[in-house]
Amino acid sequence: MENATKEELNEEFLLKEYNDSTVVTLIPVMVYVVALMIPGIVGNSFVCYFYTMKTSVSTNVMFIVSLAVYDLMVCCISMPFEIVELRFYYLFTNYAACKIGRFLNTFGAIGSALTLNVIAVDRFRRVCRPFDNQMGVKGARLAIGITISGAVLLSFPAFFLYKPVQVEIFNGDGVKLQGFDCTTSRDEGYSKLVTAFNTSHAIGFLVSVVILVTMYSMIGRRVYKTRKNAHGHNSLDKSTLRYTKMMLAITVVFVSSFLPYLILSYWRTTLDEYEGETMGNTELVAFNIGFRSYFLNSAINPLIYGLFNPKFRGFIFDILCPCRRCNLEMCPIVHATSYEVHDMAHSTSENTNETSFPSV
């Protein structure tokens, strides 16, 4: 009995020692997550504040806020969870944290994807079918509610499929150890469910890509024809086109950032052994960064909003550059920011369906 206890303590010590050495190897991955998390939290907080407090309500604003809330949730909850998981790479045994963390990761991804598809359809109707009835604020609220419900429904299986799974590993001396990883269940009774879960997400991603490519291709064709018929002068509303370009950029980033994750997720399910045992240190770092590639989407989106929206860009500059704000207060007429000028010029106009872009 005493020998068995000593053996268990020794194995526990060796596992902790091996985990700590692996954590050192994975420091670049944690730096990568932190480098996305901090600007993501700040940027998406600015987006939520600006579009809820500094602009009038419109369908565009509601969709942007919806995306920003998903991104903020990812940056505030999912990314810290991933850092904790990396710290306890072979020692993660918390069932509740594993299930909730994986559910929120899946929920944020699916919610963003569904919202982008709704936005693509709305953009198509406004650009290619401008004389049809367009989605209003009530319709946008309903669409957002449906996407949230759909994301919850499609993510809910994560509660049952993910848990701390015992994995067989070997330390540097070749000693066999039993670690734990927060991943899908390896039980034979769950294998078909896990396959169905991963397959459904892969199919959903492909369907979303097809819808997005189709919608924006038809939008691009419409813009091209309009410019050609107008002899180089675009008769379409500039604010509508700029907002459409912004959403296209966000869509491209979304698809690009999720593709490596989906490929690695599928590859992971084909392995007969734990992936950590099939890689060297460099490959392990690359795998873990690629497996978290989708975090790029949540961190980059605020930069895209700033790139395409001069009013939001001016708002950020005023916060980050106090000297600029002081100059504006000393000479408000000459140096008024773009969003102040717009507010003065459009204080009497209201459009709850399609605001001019600077107020989006």
Image: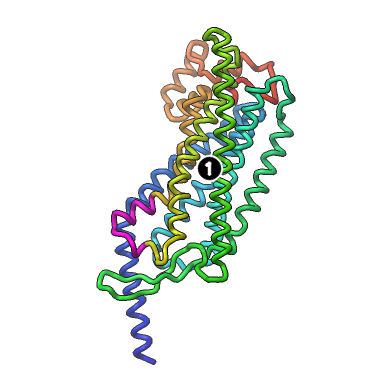
- Label 1 neighbourhood size at 10 Å, few (<14), some (14-19), many (20+)? many
Q: In the image, what residue occupies the spot 43% across and 22% down?
A: 324
Whether 225 is drawn above or below 247: the answer is above
Residue 267, position as x, y percentages in the image: 43, 56
Residue 215, position as x, y percentages in the image: 59, 31
Instruction: Work out whether residue 218 or residue 125 is closer to the camera in this orientation and state it.
Output: 218
Q: Is-magenta flag for residue 2?
A: no
Outermost residue toward the top? 231
The image quadrant where one finds the N terminus is bottom left
Residue 149, position as x, y percentages in the image: 68, 48
Q: Which residues are magenta?
A: 276-289
- The amino acid on which the numbered mark 1 sits, given as a three-letter code, is Asp
Can the viewer see residue 178?
yes
Instruction: Say which quarter of the image contains residue 54.
Output: top right
Outermost residue toward the left? 173
Q: In the image, what residue occupies the spot 32% across and 64% down?
A: 20
Left or right placement of residue 334 versus residue 278 in this view: right
Tell me how many marks there are.
1
Outermost residue toward the bottom? 1
Q: Residue under circle 1?
A: 71
Residue 186, position as x, y percentages in the image: 50, 68
Left or right placement of residue 54 versus residue 301 in this view: right
Coloring basis for residues: rainbow
Instruction: Work out whether residue 75 or residue 348 is closer to the camera in this orientation and state it.
Output: 75
The image quadrant where one finds the C terminus is top right
Can the viewer see residue 52?
no
Q: Is-magenta flag for residue 286?
A: yes
Secondary structure, mark 1, is: helix
Instruction: Work out whether residue 121 or residue 137 is closer to the camera in this orientation and state it.
Output: 121
Instruction: Say which quarter of the image contains residue 168.
Output: bottom left
Whether 62 is drawn above or below 331: the answer is below
Instruction: Say which quarter of the image contains residue 195.
Output: bottom right
